[in-house]
Amino acid sequence: MFAKPKPSSDLPGRPRFDPPRGARPHLRELPKIWAGRIVETFKKPYVAPVSALAVFAIAAFAFLNLAGDPDAASPSVRINLAKDKAPAASAHAATGDTQAGMQSFTLDSLGLFGDASADTFTDPDAPPVQGTAVITLPGDDGNGAMPAPKFTVSPLPPAPIGGLTQTTDNGPLPIIAPNGQTPASAYARPFKGDGRPIVALVVGGLGLNPATTKQAIEQLPPQVTLSFVPYVSGLQGWIDQARAAGHEVMIEVPMQPTNYPDNDPGPQTLLANARTDDLIGHLNWALSRATGYFAVSNYQGGAFFKDKAGTTVFLQNLKNRGVSFIDDGQARGLAGAWGRASADRIIDNQINSTAIFAQLGGLEATAKSRGSALGTGFAYPVTLAVALKWTQGLDAKGIQLAPASAMTHQ
């Protein structure tokens, strides 16, 4: 009763799939014969599981090659800078020697722009990109319409302001004026608190994409501080537009991350344990890209901030030039520069409207408990949309929106 049953092909009335030895099967029988052999093969132990595993491995390999880098924890953009092609003419365009040896750099907080030529993002007066992106926010009526801006534009004075600039071969450098006026105070947006808790928001990564840069300048309230990438040709034009719309601005300084050089922020990066002359030279390169900024911010810097000597040189030079430093939270506790502030939250670590609203809600709670709070984010379309809607609801919550300069202290 425990005898092994015969294969179904041996049962009476069922034809065998294998022809007699030496016989040549008819062509019409071949599909049936091969189907039978495949069935018999998969009945053998381990054949089916091993085959399934092989199919899964092949599918996974194909997906990873098509989908991109599976280890990319955050989105990135690669911008190719041709060695033999000069950037568009600009008083503050990057010099050729800073581009030598550089074919591309990555910004790991981006993700909007795909593979893009640097020349695509050189004209601040370029017309807006055609087309409409519909972003649905929590609480919307479902029509995807962006809330209309509700603010009065108060232009800031054009830059440069007399006495605050040192002319160099590489571009203008900020200095403290003979009368003691500093870029940190002269280029900051004036602010007067009304006794309510205050919150400030910095939107960074600007200048690379004309559409999102224009949207940030034109649609966000002037109290929102804008931070620009130093690698953009025509940077001064963007800063002039931002100040004309009432925004104070910052310039981002690339700093060595913990996984450098696999993650390379770009040329002129401030490196940990660098020679003092090199460090100052790289910093001055970033500072000379344009005028009209009250502060600089960090782009990355996880490794650089651990270099006590390097950060001391960096902050002391900013102080000597009357420039503030606002970081994304990585340099909290470091003193120096003309003025200092650290962000309490990065609002768009998760790039979806619900998560961003939650982070902004956390800023509100911090402001109410401590009196003030500072957040920073990147110019993703969803971040801009959420930020616009959020800022319009602050008055009703008893919170005052302030520029980031109002958060700095010496």
Image (cartoon, rainbow, N blue to C red):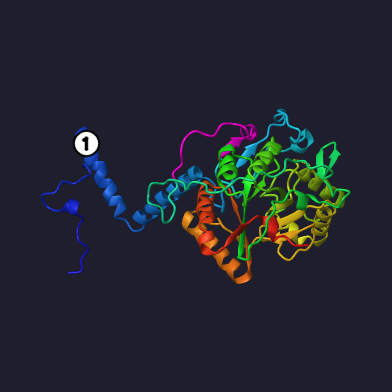
**Which residue does the numbered mark 1 point to in the structure image?**
25
- Relative to 361, is 21 above or below? above
Say what amino acid the circle numbered 1 marks. Answer: Pro
> Of 36 and 119, which appears nearest the observer?
119
Which part of the image, by quadrant, shows the C terminus? bottom right
Tell me where the magenta segment starts and ends, as one range.
114-134
> Of 50 and 172, which appears nearest the observer?
172
- Relative to 94, is 224 above or below? below
Residue 268 visible to an observer of this rendering: yes
- Relative to 237, is 184 above or below? below
Number of numbered labels in the structure image: 1
Q: Does the segment drawn in magenta span residue 116?
A: yes
Q: Does the segment drawn in magenta span residue 170?
A: no
Residue located at (66% from left, 41% from top): 244
Q: Secondary structure at mark 1?
A: loop
Question: What x and y, as percent, mark residue 332?
Answer: 70, 64
Question: What x and y, as percent, mark residue 328?
Answer: 66, 58
| Residue at the outermost bottom position | 369
Question: What x and y, as percent, mark residue 223?
Answer: 62, 52
User: How would you rate the neighbour count of disc 1 (Cα within 10 Å): few for under 14, some for 14-19, many for 20 or more?
Assistant: few
Residue located at (82% from left, 37% from top): 170
